[in-house]
Image (spheres, helix red, strand yellow):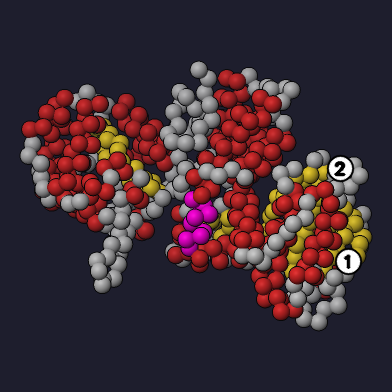
Amino acid sequence: MKKRFNITGVCFPEEHYMVDVSNKINDIFAMVDQGDYFVINRPRQYGKTTTLYLLNRLLKTSGDFFPINTSFEGIGEEGFANAAVFIDAFFLLLKEKFSSSGDDKLVKFIDSETLPDRIDKLGLWINKLVKESGKKIVLMIDEVDKSSNNQLFLDFLGMLRNKYLNRREPGQFTFHSVILAGVHDVKSLKAKIKKKDEEPKLNSPWNIAVDFKVDLSFSVNEIQSMLEDYSTEQQVTLDIPYFAERLFYLTSGYPFLVSQLCKIIHEEFLPTKKNRNEWQPEDLDKALQIALNTDNTNTESLTQNLENNPDLYELVFDIMMNGAEYTFNRNTPLIHFGVLYGIFKDETGKVRIHNRVYEQIIYHYMASKLEITGKAKFNDIIARYLDETGDLDIKKVILKFQEFMKEHYSQKDRDFLERNGRLLFLAFIRPILNGRGFDFKEVQVSEEKRLDIVVTFGSQKYIIELKKWYGEEAHGKGLNQLKDYLDRQDQNLGFLIIYDSRRQSNKIGQNETVNIGSKQIFMVCV
């Protein structure tokens, strides 16, 4: 059986195409070897569970360690009813691991022991267990986010912390290393438990953890290693350096997104092509279109985190729609949680959206929200905007948008337009493209903080720039910047939509074509 690209659950090297992460696993092994306690905190579907699985395999082969790779997710809410029930469930987990590893000695040890009924007594029992095993026991707990709101779990972590601090005392034994894996890090692994008429408690039970600095994202070279494995086994021809670079450009190495795009190309495109054994550059663009319109747990997690955090939504909106710049400071709560959820990254000291795929998903999500509010209702069908050859008449689209804005919005809507004007165009063009075309957006951080859109429709490409009016001098610079962008995109004609918030502007509703060097730019003002 040949391997496949996997985007759900654990990846197994024997079954799935994977990047070579041996260096990462070796770095984590070194942390375990020196007895570190730490949290592997990364966004959803970032390879945490697979990392624990591979680390578990390596630790087993070393001979010096006894790894216990588990999750408290399986014990359910009833497992946290009280300390005795929690400890009983923990014992069952340990017994299962010892039994599956063939360690009958430790199984018998558990069966011979009287179950403790308090967390502090559990600490004494762990002391006896580690001493009995004669090995360095490594405890790995996955999905800790699902337990961290329970006080019993936090008490359990507090007990492990105390044992860690006392580990050098005579006769004291504890787990050699403890690893927690989840979205949240130690600072945000806090209980929010409150009784009636009480304020929520905020506890940080694990300040002994060292920083986890291993980069779990995929580098270009690592993506290339996966594509080489895939190409060899499947006998598929592809420009491996090109696709590795392009996949990294779109995803910033987010593991789920890299595998998702590859999976779409292999499973959905190749079977329908005349040449089923060759990847073409346009395949990746088509895969991206499908990915952006596919509901999955990764997309749901991204949009839910924005929906559930209005302040975070506003910060993301300001960065994406207004080109706002913020200094990257992980200690700022909104930035901190944006990083935890995989939305933000640090790029040369500034807050940026983590990857270009997420940018497109968020644009679509924000545009849909605008439609749902009733502020943007578009009923036009695509046939109205096709020319006699069947290509998209983008000039007609832009003029129709200008007409729409004039008919539906007035001076009283200026505050709304100041905030949502550019988003309105993104919402306007979506039903026109209607699956046959694709719009790729990118904020250009400059004096005018413009938003560039590259629209592809069939074999045609159109460059559209959206910007606010910042005065004649800035406008002149912006035209030259658009000319340079057209050069880079190998286009001779560009389109410019200017949002003019001046109350008495006489340019609103007008359009003109200007020549900038060898380039033509068609401009409208709304």
Residue 353 can be seen in this image? yes
Residue 350 can be seen in this image? no
SS assignment for the magenta stretch, majority: helix
Q: Name the residue nearer the viewer: 155 or 246.
A: 155
Question: Left or right: 167 with respect to 178?
Answer: left
| Residue 264 occupies quadrant | top right
| Residue 110 occupies quadrant | top left
Cβ atoms under marks 2 and 1 closer than 8 Å: no
Magenta stretch contains residue 479:
no
Residue 37, position as x, y percentages in the image: 30, 47
Give the number of the disc on residue 134.
Answer: none
Question: Which residue position holds label 1?
Answer: 511
Question: Left or right: 262 with respect to 41?
Answer: right
Question: Left or right: 482 with respect to 139?
Answer: right
Q: Amino acid at mark 1?
A: Asn
> How many numbered marks have been drawn onto this rendered protein structure?
2
Q: Residue at x 56, y 66 (%)?
A: 314
Magenta range is 301-309
Magenta stretch contains residue 307:
yes
Give the number of the disc on residue 390.
Answer: 2
